[in-house]
């Protein structure tokens, strides 16, 4: 299929290009237009950008099909303009066996929508005791190894896991959280948790664990990607680590760039997230660090939760928010608040995320995979349960009116989503 | 920011979930109305017909005989029908969700739900889902609030000390886990108490507790100087296993109220305790039974305060 | 309009004169907040009654609780004598529908069983909705549509009847 996207405002964060023009895709890759198009998409008045790359999404298969299925979540992804996503290993069973990874990749490929990059479990059953067969998992298609939200309490195991991964050059993606300090906590240890009487997680639960991780990286040289930063103090530690030229990257969840502990209001369980929403000061630091590149990219941390599990007292509710379809409008909102040019804000969900993932997509240039989106940055998007394609309707932004709607999503030159 | 879910569109009290966020006028209305009900509890026929024909459902997800009994007495004195539900033993253990339990009871024509739950915020979830004519009264949710206890503590203080604007009040003990402390502190600050102190070891203080408007003391002797009202909180055994405290004896040594420490407060100071007391852990028997103690009157006032709360919300 | 309202201060001694013959050691007086209480406070010393004055708030016995809720500022009922077997003088300022008196009697019977109750009213404005009547009444008044008749007390303590717009 030879696809021409004509007359849009083409933004390629990788090169900084931001100009009206045409984009041509042939044989699944971007190419110079040669006048031979099977299909033309008129993009006048719209933005054409690389497809979004989301480094954290839960597709809930295998095992959690009552919460969501691959079909529904992949629909949500392309409706949100996400063309590549990395999915977390905390499925049931966890992605610790090559057979499971194989099956997931084949299922995703059959649906022929979004590119799914599985992240394998770092330890067996995510229990933090025995190493998984990382080489076998890599062969099956895992792009990195992670514990999702499960801690490795035993520092000896953590060290060995990082060492082993470093041997083969595998990337390890970990959340920094000390399991003892975080135990039982459901909110940030601050004024809001004090008033609401909620069990709390102090910010040093993150920095203590991060300190441990960085020390181990110094010793092992492992490529570490720190997931879901939550505090200003952790941002400073990353800044210092990068200055020291450690092989460290990191991301932040899109909700943590917009919301703080104050948004809990009267125990709104849609704000029950992991890590917790911290203070306004922390939120501001995260937002600024994402803008200046200390935080490499932003993710949706898409976690569909069925309504029953949210209609519970705050501490009993299941943590997580749906996010694939809100990633684009929320990134645009963040970019506008920080007065960033579109090329810069979009970089955090395209070229910068691609770099962490080690993927070739995320840029519009001849030879790169033909993944693109056409969107209207001004079109209003009222967030209601009916408007969301994901089976998870759980979002702190329900009832909000955001701006930014995808008109077309293209993966390898195929139009996988279209809406007038 | 959302409207306070306790108030209806006219700013009237529809549910009582927390003292925090209630205007001064409503707190005073409750205290003044409770005053009238004290008169009722002192005569032979202790009933008034206000809630005749109404059903009050006591939904206690956390067991409690004392609080449940006082709510039952208060409701019966308002001529209401009272139904007690010991949830732990029934539907919850069968896996029925909190909201399903409430919906089933609502179908049985409940008017008032008195709810006690181990999770902070549970009554708010219930209040979001009840019908317009149904009212929710929080009888204690997790660590968050115990508003009727806070109100009866305020009533007791007003009864003995009259004017909040001149008082120094000290709350002693496990503030971190105490819904009673939070409710009382909110009430005292709303009613203009100039000096509210918390006296506690660091392990038993929540983060940023000063933001509640209190002065923190770790030294009890310092904290009790010149105090008009001392409120002792109950210490639970679990605190020793959670690495928060070494032992009850050491707690008593530093934070127990003895006659000797009491002497540092004002000579006319009153001693309060929400109960049940751990004699020899937070309070010495000589003080608990002594002339400064108003612990038993607190219980009587508690019935009148609960009658006031129920009759105010049920009429709105 | 104001000229047609009777002078409350002038009615007082006439009421007292009417009541004096029925005063016995068994008679006691109860005034209803707020206007009836003011009135009773003035009448009580004029009659030489044995027991102190009782004051009653009917907030908890009103029949409009379900429509209106609990009115603000309920006062505390204090009856400093035993009601059982007594001849009671129930004092109120304005008699209108009769519902206030019905509530007052219900409340009184929760204190005990009086031997008799006589209703003493400053002004009867008609408009009864219940079979209630006053045994002693200072004056009758026609109140225009949409107006309300109130007893007021000046800072110096003088009692005065006033008309105001009904809510």
Image: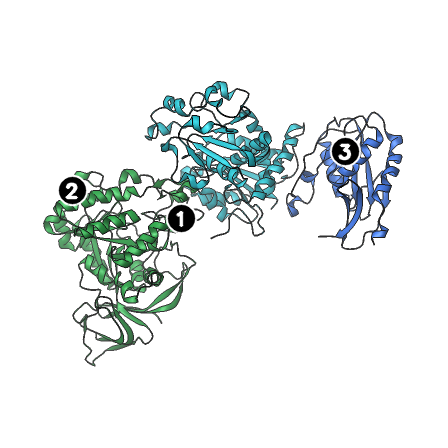
Q: Tags 3 and 2 in contact by the CB under 8 Å rule?
A: no
Residue in front for this viewpoint, A128 or B238: B238
State whether discs 3 and 2 lie on one chain.
no
Residue topped by disc 3: C30
Chain of the residue where label 2 is placed in the rendered structure = A
Q: State whether residue A382 is above or below residue A265.
A: below
Q: Which chain is blue?
A: C
The residue lying at 35 percent from left, 66 percent from top is A404
Report the disc number at residue A159: 2
Q: CA distance from mark 3 to mark 1?
A: 56 Å
Report the disc number at residue A350: none
Q: Residues within 10 Å of mark 3 (few under 14, many from 20)?
A: many
Q: Is residue B32 left or right of residue C55?
A: left
Q: State whether residue C27 is above or below residue A280.
A: above
Q: CA distance from mark 3 to mark 2?
A: 86 Å
Q: Which chain is green?
A: A
Element assignment for label 2: helix
Residue in front for this viewpoint, A45 or B270: B270
Mark count: 3
Q: State whether residue A16 is above or below residue B149.
A: below
Residue topped by disc 1: A269
């Amino acid at each position: 299929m030879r696809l021409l996207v004509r007359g849009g405002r083409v933004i390629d964060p990788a090169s900084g290009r931001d100009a009206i023009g045409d984009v041509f895709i042939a044989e699944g890759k971007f190419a110079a237009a040669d006048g031979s198009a099977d299909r033309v998409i008129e993009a006048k008045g719209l933005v054409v950008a690389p497809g979004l790359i989301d480094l954290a999404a839960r597709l809930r298969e295998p095992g959690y099909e009552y919460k969501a299925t691959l079909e529904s979540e992949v629909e949500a992804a392309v409706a949100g303009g996400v063309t590549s996503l990395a999915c977390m290993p905390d499925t049931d069973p966890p992605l610790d066996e090559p057979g499971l990874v194989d099956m997931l990749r084949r299922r995703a490929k059959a649906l022929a929508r979004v590119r799914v990059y599985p992240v394998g479990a770092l330890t067996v059953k995510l229990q933090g005791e025995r190493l998984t067969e990382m080489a076998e998992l890599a062969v099956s298609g895992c792009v990195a190894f992670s514990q999702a939200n499960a801690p490795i309490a035993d520092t000896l195991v953590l060290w060995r896991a990082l060492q082993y991964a470093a041997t083969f050059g595998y990337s390890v993606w970990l959340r920094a959280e000390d399991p003892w300090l975080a135990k039982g906590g459901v909110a940030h240890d601050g004024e809001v948790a004090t008033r609401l009487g909620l069990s709390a997680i102090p910010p040093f639960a993150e920095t203590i664990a991060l300190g441990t991780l960085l020390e181990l990286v110094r010793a092992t040289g492992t490529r570490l990607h720190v997931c879901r930063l939550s505090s200003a103090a952790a941002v400073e530690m990353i800044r210092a680590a990068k200055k020291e030229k450690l092989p460290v990257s990191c991301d932040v969840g899109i909700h943590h760039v917009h919301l703080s502990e104050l948004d809990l209001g009267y125990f709104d369980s849609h704000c029950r997230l992991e890590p917790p929403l911290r203070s306004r000061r922390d939120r501001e630091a995260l937002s600024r660090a994402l803008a200046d590149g200390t935080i490499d990219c932003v993710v949706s941390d898409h976690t569909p939760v069925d309504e029953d599990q949210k209609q519970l007292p705050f501490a009993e509710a299941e943590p997580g928010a749906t996010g694939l379809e809100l990633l684009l409008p929320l990134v645009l909102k963040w970019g506008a608040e920080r007065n960033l040019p579109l090329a810069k804000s979009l970089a955090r969900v395209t070229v910068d995320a691609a770099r962490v993932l080690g993927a070739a997509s995320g840029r519009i240039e001849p030879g790169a995979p033909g993944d693109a989106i056409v969107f209207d940055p001004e079109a209003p998007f009222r967030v209601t349960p009916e408007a969301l394609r994901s089976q998870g309707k759980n979002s702190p932004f329900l009832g909000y009116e955001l701006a930014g709607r995808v008109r077309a999503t293209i993966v390898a030159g195929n139009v996988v989503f279209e809406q007038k | 920011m959302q409207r306070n879910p306790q108030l209806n569109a006219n700013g009237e009290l529809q549910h009582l979930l927390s003292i925090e966020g209630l205007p001064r006028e409503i707190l005073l209305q409750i205290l003044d109305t409770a005053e009238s009900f004290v008169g009722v509890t002192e005569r032979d026929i202790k009933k008034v017909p206000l809630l005749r024909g109404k059903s009050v459902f006591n939904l206690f997800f956390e067991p409690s005989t004392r609080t449940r009994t006082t709510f039952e007495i208060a409701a019966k004195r308002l001529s209401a029908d009272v139904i007690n539900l010991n949830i732990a033993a029934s539907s919850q253990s069968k896996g029925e969700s909190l909201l399903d339990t409430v919906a089933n009871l609502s179908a049985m024509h409940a008017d008032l739900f008195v709810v006690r739950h181990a999770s902070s915020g549970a009554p708010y979830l219930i209040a979001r889902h009840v019908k317009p004519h149904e009212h929710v009264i929080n009888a204690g949710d997790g660590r968050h609030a115990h508003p009727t206890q806070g109100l009866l503590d305020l009533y007791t203080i007003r009864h003995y000390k009259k004017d909040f604007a001149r008082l120094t009040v000290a709350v002693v003990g496990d503030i971190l886990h105490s819904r009673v402390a939070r409710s009382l502190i909110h009430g005292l600050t709303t009613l203009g108490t100039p000096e509210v102190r918390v006296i506690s070891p660091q392990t038993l203080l929540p983060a940023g507790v000063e933001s509640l408007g209190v002065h923190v003391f770790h030294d009890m002797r310092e904290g009790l100087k010149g105090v008009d009202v001392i409120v002792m909180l109950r210490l639970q055994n679990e605190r020793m296993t959670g690495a928060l405290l070494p032992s009850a004896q050491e707690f008593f040594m530093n934070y127990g109220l003895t006659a000797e420490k009491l002497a540092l407060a004002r000579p006319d100071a009153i001693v309060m305790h929400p109960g049940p007391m751990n004699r020899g852990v937070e309070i010495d028997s000589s003080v608990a039974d002594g002339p400064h103690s108003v612990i038993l009157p607190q219980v009587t006032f508690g019935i009148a305060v609960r009658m006031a709360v129920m009759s105010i919300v049920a009429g709105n | 309009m104001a000229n047609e309202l009777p002078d409350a201060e002038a009615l007082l001694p006439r009421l007292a004169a009417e009541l004096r013959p029925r005063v016995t050691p068994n008679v006691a007086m109860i005034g209803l907040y707020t206007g009836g209480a003011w009135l009773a406070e003035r009448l009580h010393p004029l009659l030489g009654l044995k027991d102190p004055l009782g004051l009653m708030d009917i907030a908890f016995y009103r029949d409009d609780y379900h429509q209106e809720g609990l009115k603000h500022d309920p006062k505390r009922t204090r009856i400093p004598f035993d009601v059982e077997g007594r001849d009671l003088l129930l004092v109120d300022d304005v008699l209108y529908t009769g519902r206030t008196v019905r509530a007052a009697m219900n409340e009184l019977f929760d204190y005990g069983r009086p031997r008799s109750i006589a209703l003493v009213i400053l002004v009867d404005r008609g408009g009864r909705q219940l079979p209630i009547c006053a045994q002693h009444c200072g004056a009758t008044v026609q109140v225009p549509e949409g107006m309300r008749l109130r007893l007021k007390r000046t800072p110096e303590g003088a009692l005065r009847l006033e008309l105001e717009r009904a809510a």
